[in-house]
Every structure is written in C-alpha cells, then in structure tokens.
Amino acid sequence: MKRPIFARMYTRVRPAMDREGAAEHRRRLLAGAVGHVVEVGAGDGGNFAHYPAEVVRVLAVEPEPYLRAQAFRSAATAPVPVEVVEGTAERLPAADASADVVVVSLVLCSVRDQQVALAEALRVLRPGGELRFYEHVAADGGRLETAQRLADATVWSLFAGGCHLHRDTAAAIEAAGFVIEEIDRFDFPAGQPNPARPHILGRARSAVVGPVV
C-alpha cells in the first residue's frame, strides 16, 4: 500500500505534533502495557519510545513502504524489542490469541473497513487481553461535523492517506465485541480550526472474556 507523498508529509509533521502534546498522549496510551504487543499501523515508529519495560516484544505492522523503513530505524533505539513487519489491519501477520495487547494509534480513521480491522484485533488478542486506542473521531454535531462530512465527501481522504474524519470509532469498537473500560475525549490541537481535532484515548477488552492464557 504505497502512499509516498502522505508518508513523507507525515514523517515531517509527526514530530511537531508530538512536541505539541501528542507524545504525552502516546505515553498515556501505552502506560501499563505488558507482555506481547501487536501495534497496528505503526507508521514511522512514533510510539516505540514510549513502550514500558514490562513489554516483552512488539510486533509492529505497517503497510506503507516508506513509513515501514522509518519504523525500522526507530525500532533500533526502542527501549523494548520491536519487530517491524509488512501487513495490514485487515490481515494481521500474527497468530490467534498471540497478543496481550493490541495497539491502534491514529490508524482506524484510514482502514478500509473498521469492523474487519477490529475483528482481526480481537482474533490476535488472548482472552482477557486489551485493545489500546488513540484516534481522532467524528464531531458530535455543529459546524465541525458538517465540515468533516464535506471533507470526507471531497478531497480529504485523497490527500490524507485514506483518512476519514467522520467515523464514530468508539461505537465501532463496541460493535466489534469489545467493552470500553476507559475513554477520554478531548480536542487536539485544542482551539485550532482543525477538522480532525476531536480525539478519543482509552482501553477496551473483549466482551466475552475467558481464562487468561
């Protein structure tokens, strides 16, 4: 899945967004994670530096070649072992029930089918495992929602790497069979005319939890 223009733009913008507060969001996203992790849509590896020592291994899945190459470089300095592999959210290169945690970070806006991607997350999670999510989402009414719908219907996805602004990702997570245990809703960047500013950050588990393996 080649998106070379978007990939190069993202690698330039991402460090600036981290300095403005996204790095703290990433830290919160990953705090307390343990064991084996599958990170879906790892991008250029912006999350890698924030994994806690209790994480045994990260399987970082990234379909875009340029971003994957950048992720390889980031993996070399990560505080935990990170293996970067090619793959998509809809077809993760991981075995059933092989992950303690699945991480989706600014990726569910751009997958082709959220339900297929979330079903894959559920497949690779062990019983009792966690879904950690950090995503920008649909606005709840007003001019911002109108702007999101208009952008989605025109050029936004074309120029933003397949991103869709107006997705109710929290509802999609619940519809996929997860129970959201913690969710924070906030605007980022706050106070700016950015149609992607509504965000969610939180944790979820499978609605049907068996004995932890």
Image (cartoon, rainbow, N blue to C red):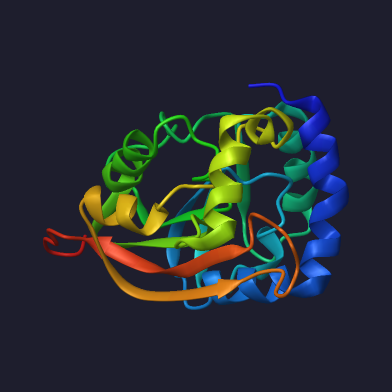
Name which quarter of the figure residue 211 lies in.
bottom left
Rendered view: 77 above or below 120: below
Residue 76, given in percent of the width and then of the height, sits at: 77, 52
Residue 188, given in percent of the width and then of the height, sits at: 66, 69
| Placement of the N terminus among the 4 image quadrants | top right
Residue at image position (31%, 55%) is: 171
Rendered view: 194 above or below 32: above
Is 105 positioned to the left or the right of 113 in the image?
right
Between 141 and 136, the residue placed more toward the observer is 141
**Is any part of residue 61 visible from this angle?**
no
| Placement of the C terminus among the 4 image quadrants | bottom left
Residue at image position (56%, 64%) is: 198
Residue at image position (56%, 31%) is: 153
Residue 66, given in percent of the width and then of the height, sits at: 78, 31
Is 200 positioned to the left or the right of 191 in the image?
left
Residue 197, given in percent of the width and then of the height, sits at: 64, 62
**Is any part of residue 145 visible from this angle?**
yes
